[in-house]
Amino acid sequence: MMRTHTCGELGRDDLCSQVTLSGWVRFSRDHGGVLFIDLADSYGSTQLVHDPEALDGVDQGSILEVLESVGRESVIAVGGTVRERVPGTEDSRNPTGQVEVLINSVNVLSKSRPIPFEIAEQKNSMLPGEDLRLRYRYLDLRREGMVRNLKLRHRVISAGRTFLDGQGFIEVETPMLTRSTPEGARDFIVPSRLSPGDFYALPQSPQLYKQMLMIGGVDRYYQLARCFRDEDPRADRQPEFTQLDLEMAFVDHEDVFVVMEGLISAMWKAARGEELRTPFPRIPFAESLSRYGTDAPDMRFALPLVDVTNVVREVPYEIFRRILSKGGVVIGVNVKSDLLDDQVGRNEVDRLIEWAKAQGMGGITWMRMTSEGLNSNIVKYFTTEVLRELTETMAAEEGDLLLFLAGPSASTLAGGAALRLKLSQDLGLVEDDDHRFVWIVDTPVFEKDPVSGALDACHHPFVLPMDPEDLDDDPEQALGFSYDLVLDGVELGSGSLRNHDPEVQRKVFHLLGLSDERIDEQFGFFMEALSFGAPPHGGMAIGIDRLCALLTGADSIREVIAFPKNKRMFSPVDSCPAPVNEERLNELQIISLAGDDFEDIDLDDL
Ligand code: ASP
């Protein structure tokens, strides 16, 4: 038997038992001829002791020799007796910390080379650089923190599956080698050897397949789906990620909300043991933008943005004048007096202004509400009437600090969103362990490209417009049955009801600038499927990596993925992407123009 117990199991109940443990030699130390070893596995760690005085009749010498010959992180199996630790040496933080195992036999199962970094749990600041951790990820995964993260991820996924099974969903796998699915990113493409010059795409999501499952009569589908998007490196992005993807037939959007809230609650409970309060609040997209400057607002603190453009329109303050004459806006934030401790004085405001400038905002204009009314170095430009209106619009009370941003609408709202976050951090407004979900609803079907003026899909092209007539009358104003779920200012997932009427779907494609020819070429198969009786349907997908990162409090999704790519989209553990040999390329009829070869190729010969 390799082991009678795991390394996280033994306690006082096991005193005097003969046990066999197997695991990694995490730590060893010699205390005056008595050797202590922490033997670890993914369940915990147990103290082993080699004590020459405690055992008679065992070949102590050879055991010691073996123990001294193995380096840290070698794998051993030991036999021994469970005994109490010497009083005063118990470790109350370790569940096995009341006992130790007196070794009477040892077997080396495999030896480890010297390790490149410390594996025993330590403060985050002591962690080695991320690239080193990822290069030796299999060692990094032995660390307690990573074990915790992977186990939490498993619990979340497993609770999700159990919940959906209970709701009548079935898990169906959809292809990895696909025709391109449009989620707005670039596809990873896979060359076909059997059809040279043709390519599969890795799925950006199972969107069209899950819709075809609905057409196929599958009533409730889900899948733990791997998705691939070939995007430029961005903080906390991975080229491949996992979604809990689902779709339901014969539903309206309320049905989707109920299932999603149940699902999230089940996963939350599995991870944290807490019940979530549902239903989650809902905010229309337009209100989210105007009140929080973003469609992914952090609801753990208030600090709403207030548009005061019309209040200050006539004020002869040069900065506002210039901006307003070009169609810009002025938005304010009221930092209520109870949020400000006495420290927030002129210096702090100046620092905030510098911060805003460094972020590319024009700067911040400020006022304080005193017992005599609004006060700052610019109130001289404001009439009493405007100051009164400003006080009212901003709901200013004595002691409040009013901050204003001015500029073009989109960038000023984005600046407002950043300012809210900055203030929440500086003023410590987010309480530990406070988490807020919010639905963003009533999203426009289209967004206008600011440069070309062309319409793009706000979510994706399959969203059902609330009123399909808007597509003819005023497509830019058309709202869709689509919804984003946001947690603590991070978008966790999105979904929608879909177009099940092929004519409406075609109209949306037309508005997106696709000719009938392009529609047939790109989506002919799907349009055909829609024409064979598609049920009304809708669904959603939740980003599992992001959800687990939020649940563990990790600052990056890489902490909850076993083998992630690094920030440059490179996988340090197996060094990929990597070149393929020429033979394989020849089979695929692909010519590499990269590197030195480029010089040798005569393009006229191609
Ligand atoms: N396929 C969508 C996405 O990946 C989710 C959905 O609409 O169900 O964002």
Image (cartoon, rainbow, N blue to C red):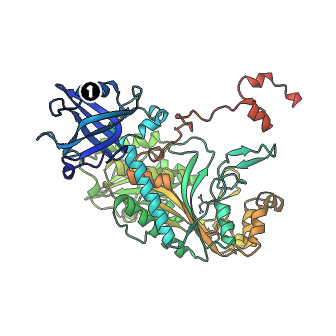
Q: Residue furthest front?
A: 57
Instruction: Indicate the position of residue 256 as horizontal and vertical percent values.
Output: 53, 71
For ligand 1, give the image quadrant.
bottom right
Image quadrant in which the C terminus is located = top right
Q: Secondary structure beneath disc 1? A: helix
Residue type marked 1: Leu
Residue depicted at 76% across the width and 25% down the height? 598
Residue depicted at 42% across the width and 66% down the height? 266
Instruction: Indicate the position of residue 343 as horizontal and vertical percent values.
Output: 25, 46
Viewer-proximal residue, 213 or 428? Answer: 213
Viewer-proximal residue, 234 or 220? Answer: 220
Image quadrant in which the N terminus is located = top left
Residue that badge 1 annotates: 64
* Classed neighbour count for the residue bearing mark 1: other residues with Cα under 10 Å, few (<14), some (14–19), many (≥20): some
Instruction: Indicate the position of residue 169 as horizontal and vertical percent values.
Output: 55, 70
Judged left or right of residue 519, residue 168 is left
Res 79 → quadrant: top left
Q: Residue furthest left?
A: 87
- Residue 121 appears anywhere in the view: no
* Numbered circles on residues, count: 1
- Residue 540 appears anywhere in the view: yes
- Whether 91 is drawn above or below 456: the answer is above
- Whether 345 is drawn above or below 434: the answer is above
Residue depicted at 36% across the width and 50% down the height? 423
Judged left or right of residue 547, residue 214 is right
Instruction: Indicate the position of residue 470 as horizontal and vertical percent values.
Output: 68, 72
